[in-house]
Amino acid sequence: MALKALDIYKLLPKKNCKECGDPTCLTFAMKLAGGKADVDLCPYLDENAKAVLGATTRPPIRLVKIGVGERTFAVGEEFVLYRHEKTFYHPPGIIFKVKDTQSPEEIAAATVRVRDELFTRVGTDLRFNGIAIENTSGSADIFSRAVAVVEDHADLPLVLMAQTPEAFATALVQVASYRPLLCTATRENYREMCALSKKHGCPMVIRANTLDDLAALAKDCVNEGALKLVMDLSPTTLEDFLVRSTAVRQLAITRKVPELGYPVFFDTTITGMQDAAIALGIVKYASVIITTPLSAESSKAALTLRQNIYTDPQKPIQMNPGLYRVGTPGKDAPVLMTVNFSLTFFTLQGYLESTRVPCFLLIVDTEGLSVLTAVAAGKLNEFLVRDALKKFGVELEVSHKKLIIPGYAAPLSGRIEDATGWKVLVGPRDAAEIGEYLNDEWKS
Ligand code: SF4
């Protein structure tokens, strides 16, 4: 059962020393109660308090931040197994991998792509998240030079993939301030890796061949003071990844094995089926996805899928209501009304742009519902349209009083005319037909 802030406060040391980052123990207790802090941030908790608080207040999957600055991203802090139970909160970072054996030009090109590429879909800017540099050469110096090329071109979240603590140490001289994700700590090297992670404040990937070994390694890393962990499940096939990542999610969410409550790392370049692996990773619980630089088609597919999976299923994506312009409409331009469901807006806007008929688009607030649903639910009605016409000053923009409404809103046409005094024209049901409709029917 979740503890209240005062119950939590009773278990805290009450030193008010601020070492947890909060001004008082009570503030820290309130954050813990809201699942917004981690018990490990207080160094003075006794084992009993740690066990009680850790089991009840910590998000089942820890939040881990990758990188610093504008492009930093957070992963983890998920609460459900299935998206429809609530929502997924933190989309996986998709990271382009380069090898230190590649030419500086190739490394720079991949870096610049991640820095600059932007895909805008339903009003949201979608980007890749960072660059992973792999120490394929085995040489700390070559690795360090490749890292410097990336650093010269962008301030991006980084993943350093190397085999030896020496290679990490050399690279960290240049990029420690970016808090790169260090990849990978194993049973053999975890003490040195934990020391590096702690010294530089970097998150760290841990890897083991079985989930039992991974849980034990996570526990040992925490005991060494490395708290920002991401887990590599060592999959050898896609099926393997699916089985392990699902098991980890279940064991973490139910808190049966809290040591597995960390975000999951997935290097899709080892699978030989990269596009499928990326899709699987997005859908089935990967939080950091490593890929070679993707083609334009694969990029759009990955970013679109990620956006869809990490959109709250209970909240339709909405536009702000208002009067939008397509092209440079004049006083005699048509005025089209529709709802603020993003997909409706952007679909219609796309078709209108291709018709090259400048026009006004009046977006009314149906709480993100589509036209058909909004009419059926009574969310789209004559008063909403009347108020929107007034609020957004449509009469001041045009010299006529004609309003084109969507075909699915036809049953409201008479009532909208009575409420607004505007002549209502019923447009097509299918946005694809709007060009033909305007060309044939529109006269101001
Ligand atoms: S670190 Fe612990 S003792 Fe210090 S203020 Fe935070 S909760 Fe209180």
Image: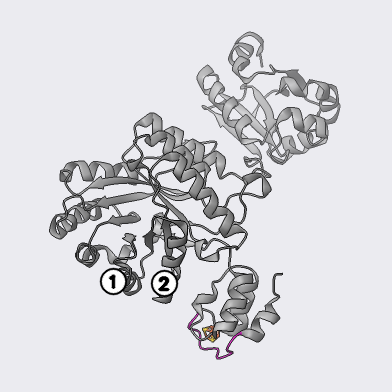
Residue 58 position within the rendered picture, expressed as x and y whole percent measured from the top left: 58, 68
- In front here: 407 or 335? 407
Mark number, residue 192: 1
Amino acid type indicated by mark 2: Asp
- In front here: 246 or 295? 246
Residue 108 lies within the magenta run: no
- Name the mark nearer the viewer: 2 or 1: 2
Please tell me whether the stretch drawn in magenta is mainly helix, strand or loop. loop
Mark number, residue 113: none
Is 403 drawn above or below residue 91 in the view shown? Answer: above
Q: Which corner quadrant of the image does residue 311 belong to? A: top right
Secondary structure of the residue carrying numbered label 2: helix
- In front here: 353 or 298? 298
Residue 257 position within the rendered picture, expressed as x and y whole percent measured from the top left: 55, 63
Residue 152 position within the rendered picture, expressed as x and y whole percent measured from the top left: 22, 54
Magenta-colored span: 12-20
Sequence order check: which comes first, mark 2 or mark 1? 1
Measuring 29% from the left and 57% from the top, which residue is drawn there? 160
Amino acid type indicated by mark 1: Glu
Is 436 drawn above or below residue 393 in the view shown? Answer: above
Image quarter where ligand 1 lies: bottom right
**Total number of numbered labels?**
2
Mark number, residue 220: 2
Query: Quadrant of the image for the C terminus?
Result: top right
Residue 345 position within the rendered picture, expressed as x and y whole percent measured from the top left: 61, 31
Image side of residue 129 versus residue 59, left or right? left
Q: In this view, which residue lies farthest toward the bottom?
A: 15
